Image: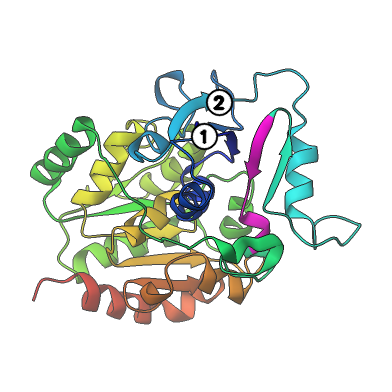
Amino acid sequence: MPGPKILFPPGFGDSYWCLTKMESFIERNKLDRPRVYTWESNTGAYVRGKPRTVGFLERYPFIQYMGGWLDQPHFDKRKVWEKFWAAPMCPQNEKPMWIQKAYGFGCIILLNGVLENGLTLDSPLDGLNKYHTNWYPLEAPSQEEIDAETVYRDKYGRYLVAHFSGTGHYGQYYYDMVGFPQIAKLLIDVKNRASIDHILVVGVDWDASSANGICMYDKTGSLVNLVNQTTAPQLMGLIKGSIGGIGTHSGCTMMPVIQKKPTIMFYTNRFPLWNPSFIKNCLPPESLENWYFPRYIELFGQEEGNILNLAERIWKPT
């Protein structure tokens, strides 16, 4: 039967968690490629005026990505978001939801609240565990993505992909602890220690504040600022062509982990929802300390030597 109209959150990471459940959801409910929208504006901030999820969700052949939804009247993003986040975000201290019907959608799906309340994607919460979690959803990359992988590898050699969240939202919790000069120095030291050719700094326009702030302290040509210069398919090709990832927690740093590329991901314990359970549960269990290496930025100074040793171990050619 035709699939229901489904609403996902925006962005690579938030929508990725939804994708991990969708193949099983489709199979159990005998659906045929459900129509997926995201709560972002079709005139929103992404390269070439497209929502940031365009080109990412289109990679997955078991859904039909239809575009953003926030341009529709009567959609209360805050009300829906808070209902899904629930405890500990909402004063009612309700349990977090992961699925509901509203606004004409057969399903609104959001798994952030599940993870950030310390639960796993296999929690029995509201029947979530009925649906198998596939951490590596079926992909059908576009020709643009395939070509980009070759282009970036040919141009930049052995490179890391780096993403440091913009100074807004949770980025503020990082950069009042560790300054841009320290981050730039670490990236250059990582490059040199692990015999890496370049570090490509990626992101969209709201990441420009951090990317520009970091790259301005590089006088060696080690860092290449590509913020707002890639489409989603090009970014995925860039990630696939890389030897790994480094940066703050985001969809951009999650994607190298999903591609099984060694990734050092920084968290901050000043952001209350990034608890130890979230850090462990947000990515494939087998990746933890095998190719996914979470580290707290609060320990940045005293752990810098250990980070460089780790970088040499996971990225330097043998």
Q: Which residue is mark 1?
A: 3
| Residue at 48% from the left image edge and 49% from the top image edge | 22
| Secondary structure type for disc 2 | strand
> Which three-letter amino acid code belongs to the residue tagged 1?
Gly
Left or right for 204, reference 245:
right
Left or right for 198, reference 185:
left
Work out whether residue 210 or residue 247 is closer to the camera in this orientation and state it: 247
- Residue 70 location, x and y as percent? 65, 25
> For residue 70: magenta?
no
Q: Earlier in the sequence, mark 1 or mark 2?
A: 1
> Which three-letter amino acid code belongs to the residue tagged 2?
Gly
Query: Which residues fall within the magenta stretch?
Result: 105-114
Left or right for 155, reference 1:
left
> What number of labels is visible?
2
| Residue at 36% from the left image edge and 41% from the top image edge | 60
Q: Which residue is mark 2?
A: 68
Disc 2 crowd rating (10 Å Cα; few below 14, some 14-19, many 20+) is: many
